[in-house]
Image (cartoon, grey):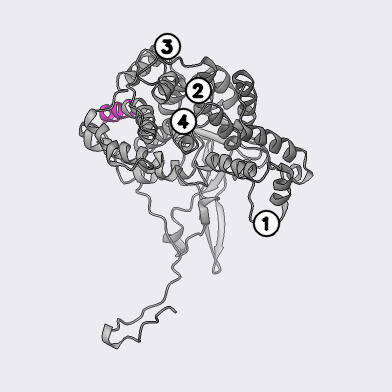
Amino acid sequence: MSDDTKLKPVKVEIEGKQFEFPVVRGSENEKGFDISKLRDQTGYITIDNGYANTSSCQSAITFLDGEKGVLRYRGIPIEQLASQSNFLEVSYLLIYGHLPTRVELDAFTKGVTQHTLVREDLVKLYDGFPRDAHPMAVLSSIVCAMSTFYQDSLDPTNKDQVEISIHRLMAKIPTIAAYAYKTSIGQPRIYPRNDLDYCSNFLHMMFAVPTEPYHVPKEVVEALNLLLILHADHEQNCSTSTVRLIGSSAANLFASISGGICALWGPLHGGANQAVMEMLADIHRDGGDVNKYVRLAKDKTSSFKLMGFGHRVYKNFDPRAAIIKKACDKVLARMGVNNPLLEIAKRLEEAALKDQYFIDKKLYPNVDFYSGIIYSALNIPVNMFTVMFALGRLPGWIAHWKEMNEGGATKIGRPRQIYTGPQTTEYVPINQRGKLKVAA
């Protein structure tokens, strides 16, 4: 953190009186003024719908600059991590704050690997869900249920208990996710194989069957590893903020992560890549005329929205999209995928990128657009797309929960509001109230 003593406080005039609030500056020269004493000193609070201009915390985990298209984990550019690292190493970086030594990485990998099995009594819960239950509902439920099976590691103030909970979550989430998929299609659940690496093990549990051997294709493993790295953290987004808010009440790690999964489920957050594929399916059913839908996207009177283009934070381009586009082209070429939706996606991308409307508004394909295409090429079903997002985002959630609990200055989250309801009204006994209006 920069030396804030050199920064002049912000002066605010309210009802003819001046108030000063200290300025905080981050390591990337981001500035904000601290209004934690605003209500006490002035009687006023701020309104910031969606918290787009409000910092809920100070964090040393991830930096992004939406105007310049910059994303860094613990200071390291995402481009370097995507090309040189692997998912477990990136997970260690996010959770523990530095790139691991060989000894540290081996110990972390071993700690995760030895916890890949899910208890058989926990697995029985799967049979209580409907066959068509959304896997995100199953994932969040099973993760929350882990707090009942691992009551030896629920204390957020006990470092040893937190450590084993981290290992258990990192290890078991792939197993839990794969079991949700297998249950939904009526296939036997496949035990994890600890001789495989993290991504290969997940793919084996997803696609292997007991009747024949399954070989995990190298290019598929590489693509999944890249996708998980790109999704590993993204600052104070909806699901991460949810994890921190739940954790601020001293809730255990399992409960906090379960809440984050539920927040990620929404189509405006983690469900966006699923929405992309559903949009492509709609275009395909309508004859595949991508130019028609580009025109509809520009038509203010149309209800059609072009999913997978633009980003709330990135005002220029999404650096993850640039990386994943190259991987997308590579994966499709290697696998020789022949899918009409993928063909429509490529034509839609080409049409939009040549259109002056999209160029002027800087509406470029984002990470959700390309990740949905790759997951489809890897034979990941559409309803599992958001689960894949959760697998990648898990270390980021853990890192933020851990940072918050170790920070020492955390207060339980309690946003204010501006009340707009009726003023004081008298209670009316039921026999004195007017007749109820019955709908026609």
Return the residue nearer the eye: 320 or 3: 320
Q: Which mark is residue 102?
A: 3
Residue 85 versus residue 387 in the image, above or below: above
Asked whether the beta carbons under mark 2 and mark 3 sit within 8 Å of each other, the answer is no
Asked whether the beta carbons under mark 3 and mark 1 sit within 8 Å of each other, the answer is no
Q: Which amino acid does label 4 sit on?
A: Gly
> In the picture, residue 65 is in which quadrant?
top right
- Asked if residue 429 can be seen in this view, the reply is no
Residue 370 versus residue 238 in the image, above or below: above
Asked whether the beta carbons under mark 4 and mark 2 sit within 8 Å of each other, the answer is no
Answer left or right for 390 relative to 328.
Answer: left
Circle 4 crowding by C-alpha within 10 Å: few under 14, some 14–19, many from 20: many
Tell us which disc is closer to us: 2 or 3: 2
| Residue at horizontal 58 percent and vertical 32 percent from the top | 373
Mark 2 sits on what residue? Answer: 225
> In the picture, residue 168 is in which quadrant?
top left
Mark 1 sits on what residue? Answer: 302
- Asked if residue 316 can be seen in this view, the reply is yes
Q: What residue type is labelled 1?
A: Ser
Tell us which disc is closer to us: 4 or 1: 1
